[in-house]
Amino acid sequence: MRSDALLARLDLVRKTGNGRWVCRCPTHDDRGPSLSVRELDDGRVLLHCFAGCDVQSILDAIGLAFEDLFPERIGGDVVKRERRPFNAADVLRCLSFEALILCQYATTMAKGDALTKDARERLLTAAKRFQHGAEVTHA
């Protein structure tokens, strides 16, 4: 499946670059675009929800399967694994979003309000993403 067929099933799609879009995530109550869609040169489509939704849930919500994110293979074609590093702008955009999550929950806790179980889990996800970012930059 090409990205245009996938994008037709999503709302508020906005192109952000060559083979890159953002849109509303169909899995949660999304006020603004939090789902990133990227089509690679070999036809594979990558999905990432910055609110933390998993890809399977996103695909279920739009009636697709994991196989739909990959180009049709003819015969015994072997797809070479892509080894490009992350685009610095994408990494900074992701970390910027995670920083907003951390600030939001820090403000809530500073007011003396307790975090919900979901909020605590999301806070841990944001912290793990920052930790992983620190580990890969020192490698």
Image (cartoon, rainbow, N blue to C red):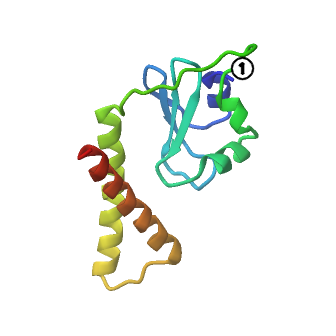
Q: Position of residue 46 (x, y in %)?
A: 55, 34
Q: Rate crowding at label 1 as few (under 14), some (14 to 19) or many (20 or more) other CA atoms within 10 Å.
A: few
Q: Position of residue 104 (x, y in %)?
A: 34, 66
Amino acid at pointer 1: Glu
Return the residue nearer the eye: 58 or 9: 58
Return the residue nearer the eye: 14 or 78: 78
Number of labels in the image equals 1
Against 65, residue 80 (above or below) is above
Against 109, residue 31 (above or below) is above
Q: Position of residue 18 (x, y in %)?
A: 44, 19
Which residue is rendered at x = 63% and y = 51% of the image?
A: 27
Which residue is rendered at x = 61% and y = 46% of the image?
A: 55
Which residue is rendered at x = 46% and y = 49% of the image?
A: 50
| Horizontal relation, residue 43 to residue 17: left or right | right
Task: Say if residue 49 shows up in the picture.
Answer: yes
Quarter of the figure that contains the C terminus: top left
Which residue is rendered at x = 36% and y = 70% of the image?
A: 105
Q: Residue furthest left?
A: 138
Identify the secondary structure beneath mark 1.
loop
Q: Position of residue 87 (x, y in %)?
A: 34, 31
Residue where numbered disc 1 is placed: 72
